[in-house]
Amino acid sequence: MSDTNTHGRARLDQLPEWHALGKHREELGEVRLRELFDQDPQRADRYSLQVGDLHLDYSKHLVTDETLRLLRELAASSGVAELRDAMFRGERINVTEDRAVLHTALRAPRSAVIQVDGHDVVPAVHAVLSKMSVFTDRIRSGEWTGHTGKRITNIVNIGIGGSDLGPAMAYEVLRPYADRGLTLRFVSNVDGADLHEAVRDLDPAETLFIIASKTFTTIETITNATSARNWLLTGLNADTSAVAKHFVALSTNAEKVTEFGIDPANMFEFWDWVGGRYSFDSAIGLSLMLAIGPDHFREMLAGFHLVDEHFRYAPPEENVPLLLGLLGVWYGGFHDAQSHAVLPYSHYLSRFTAYLQQLDMESNGKSVDRQGNPVTWQTGPVVWGTPGTNGQHAYYQLLHQGTKVIPADFIGFANPIGELGPLAGQHDLLMANFFAQTQALAFGKTPEEVAAEGVPAELVPHKTFRGNHPTTTILATELSPSVLGQLIALYEHKVFVQGAVWNIDSFDQWGVELGKVLAKRIEPALSEGATIPGLDGSTEALVRRYRELRGR
Ligand code: F6P
């Protein structure tokens, strides 16, 4: 195993800064948040940062000034800033796929110049955005009609992973900004039930399918797209000429799009330097743009860009994505935290954590470093969570009194959005829960406090709250398109920081390949009873059982 990485730096576990953190952790021992706040009444102010509209309070973390200093030193010695700058410059930092990583170019202003292989990509980005805007206006105004001349009122996005999770999440978030006259649905699962339920009450004459696939080879998407085309042509009793008015594609692969039968004029392009899970603000966002309109979409891109600039230029002490990334390194590396909860206190963010699961876990779920050596440190956590108050009545018990270290992000807003009318009055109650939970998690309730309430001695341990559970609070004025862009960029760059410190390639996803290959081999055994040479005993028995149960 090599002692250095490609930059000639020592492996993470050989760095003096890593060892210094280990020693510091031992010396800190069981640091108590109550004591930290008692010692420093200014802690909440000192441990708060602002980026754009996002106020970030990290005072309820198990850290001291010394912890933060050592973490920043670790970031410096592991080359986070150098890798960040290389990413923004368009260098091929996705080493195993030999690709640039330039999702930041998707939200760069027209005036920016960003080169990939000596070629400025910004004009092409803006050309596609303009094409998306023109198309959006034509659909929303009714100028673009379906094959029979009817106005398009239903949009069905067919895609999976990065070609689904971003727009599906953002459509939920920005519903209050959406044209309520349009029905948007998202189909991802190869289970036929997904497409069936999405189209069963739709009129094909009024329906537009957006086939979203970077590669245009993903089996789930191509299967669903083919079924959708059959549904449309049957429903319209039409020949394939109808496809042109009802199908558009979002892809990097013009050849496959044409092969499928979609006119390349109806294709919205993006590029191989946009990773699937980082593609939401490329053409992959077309369904969202159709819903909220080009202006709101551009506001969202501006929110992304604001955080890009912050990540690129803010000093380490004020750099919010750097801080969030390093806190995760601290808990994974020195507190044995295995998971990370993201708990939004906004119903509109109900799919946000699902989106982050791909962003984080597909990026940093790796166990070899960029040189292919096994890592001996923890990498990406399991990311999970659902909207806050629902979680309170389900799994928060474990957060408060379980045995695991689970750092959590609480995301909330000062103002409700949308036309809630009298329901807006519920917002204070929602946010009271938000603040109460982070308070209880941090400070708990001691046995003495419980006993002082007259609780019988035998029940005291059950009613005691250890506290000391670390949380980040992210608070913004309201959930606007720009704030959504800011939030996503914040997490993108947090994930980047962690990948850089752990020295893993956050931009490949080889771990999804094996299952795809095996599924292709197994499918003929299920449908036709084909024999698969070398199949293991368990899978073979299950395939046999499946066929019996299906009466084959
Ligand atoms: O299988 C994983 C993956 O490659 C993701 O990274 C990607 O977002 C998803 O599949 C969909 O890929 P595509 O956009 O090429 O259909």
Image (tube, helix red, strand yellow):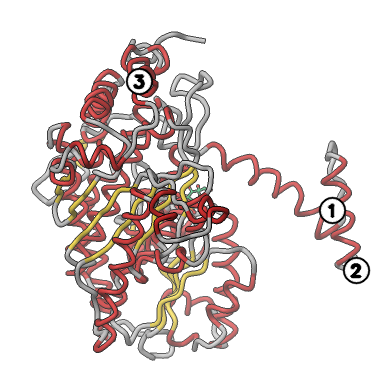
Give the residue pinned by disc 1: 543
How far across and down, in percent of the image, does residue 441 sit?
38, 51
Give the alpha-carbon distance from disc 3 to disc 2, as whole Å: 65 Å
Quadrant of the frame with the C terminus: bottom right
Amino acid identity at mark 3: Glu
* In the image, farthest residue toward the left: 111
Give the residue pinned by disc 2: 551
Q: Is mark 2 within 8 Å of ligand 1?
A: no
Q: Residue, x 76% and y 49% (percent of image)?
A: 522
Amino acid identity at mark 1: Val
Amino acid identity at mark 2: Gly
Give the residue pinned by disc 3: 27
Which quadrant holds residue 499? top left
Could you tell which of marks 1 and 3 lies nearer the N-terminus? Answer: 3
Could you tell which of marks 2 and 1 lies nearer the N-terminus? Answer: 1
Could you tell which of marks 3 and 2 lies nearer the N-terminus? Answer: 3
How far across and down, in percent of the image, does residue 372 sit?
50, 21
Q: Is residue 223 left or right of residue 249?
A: right
